[in-house]
Image (cartoon, helix red, strand yellow):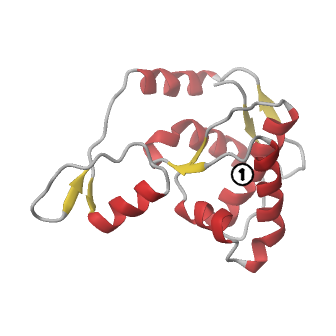
């Protein structure tokens, strides 16, 4: 972890919260010139919104995110499973307990609970999921690097 952040936000729904979190994270990444940068989300909705801008209520935030991403080198935002985003989810929960302000709390080193999560990730524990071929293809299309095809006779792909 190079830098992390928390921020209390007011969102209409989980997709809006994910979009606001992306915006809140990409802004300090630009300020600190953290490029090249890999961005992963467990929200396929966010990837679709960035690609197609298909939800008028979010247009301004989507455009701002795209501009910030372009400044960082026009990065690809890819999908990762919830289990691969444990640090982000921990920081999100921490941020949800804060009073709503415009202030972003920046962490230049991980808080102790995040250090434990990072260590668990380094220990390379894996999870197996069964996915339908349509879900498998969708996640692969969204850049998920964890989906591994295994030939199956019943049209189900293990992960």
Q: Name the spot of residue 135 as percent of width and height, x first.
A: 35, 64
Q: Farthest residue in the right direction?
A: 102
95 or 70: nearer the viewer: 70
Label 1 sits on residue: 21
Left or right: where does residue 66 sit relative to residue 82?
right
Residue 54 lies, with reference to residue 117, above or below; the image says below
Residue 53 lies, with reference to residue 95, above or below; the image says below
Quarter of the picture holding the N terminus: top right
The structure residue drawn at horizontal position 48% and vertical position 47%, both measured from the top left corner, is 80
- Identify the secondary structure beneath mark 1: helix
Q: Residues within 10 Å of mark 1 (few under 14, many from 20)?
A: some
Is residue 116 something that shows in the picture? yes
92 or 26: nearer the viewer: 26
Q: Farthest residue in the left direction?
A: 153
Q: In the picture, residue 64 is in which quadrant?
A: bottom right
Q: Name the spot of residue 99 as percent of width and height, x first.
A: 82, 49
97 or 57: nearer the viewer: 57
Residue 59 lies, with reference to residue 114, above or below; the image says below
Q: Name the spot of residue 156 as percent of width and height, x first.
A: 20, 61
Left or right: where does residue 85 sit relative to residue 155?
right
Q: In the picture, residue 89 is in which quadrant?
A: top right
Q: In the picture, residue 128 is in which quadrant?
A: top left
Is residue 7 something that shows in the picture? no
Left or right: where does residue 134 sit relative to residue 61?
left
Badge count:
1
80 or 74: nearer the viewer: 74
Q: Name the spot of residue 119 as percent of width and height, x first.
A: 47, 20
The structure residue drawn at horizontal position 57% and vertical position 26%, both measured from the top left corner, is 113
The structure residue drawn at horizontal position 70% and vertical position 77%, both measured from the top left corner, is 55
């Amino acid at each position: 972890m190079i830098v992390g952040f928390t921020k209390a936000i007011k969102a209409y729904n989980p997709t809006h919260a994910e979009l606001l979190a992306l915006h809140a994270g990409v802004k300090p990444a630009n300020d600190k010139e953290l490029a090249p940068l890999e961005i992963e989300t467990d929200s396929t909705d966010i990837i679709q919104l960035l690609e197609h801008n298909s939800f008028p209520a979010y247009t301004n935030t989507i455009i701002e995110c795209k501009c910030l991403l372009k400044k960082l080198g026009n990065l690809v935002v890819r999908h990762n499973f919830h289990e691969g985003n444990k640090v982000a989810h921990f920081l999100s929960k921490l941020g949800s307990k804060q009073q709503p302000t415009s202030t972003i709390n920046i962490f230049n080193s991980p808080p102790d609970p995040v250090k434990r999560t990072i260590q668990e990730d380094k220990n390379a524990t894996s999870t197996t999921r069964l996915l339908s071929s349509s879900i498998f293809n969708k996640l692969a299309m969204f850049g998920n690097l964890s989906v591994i095809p295994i030939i199956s006779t019943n049209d189900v792909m293990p992960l």
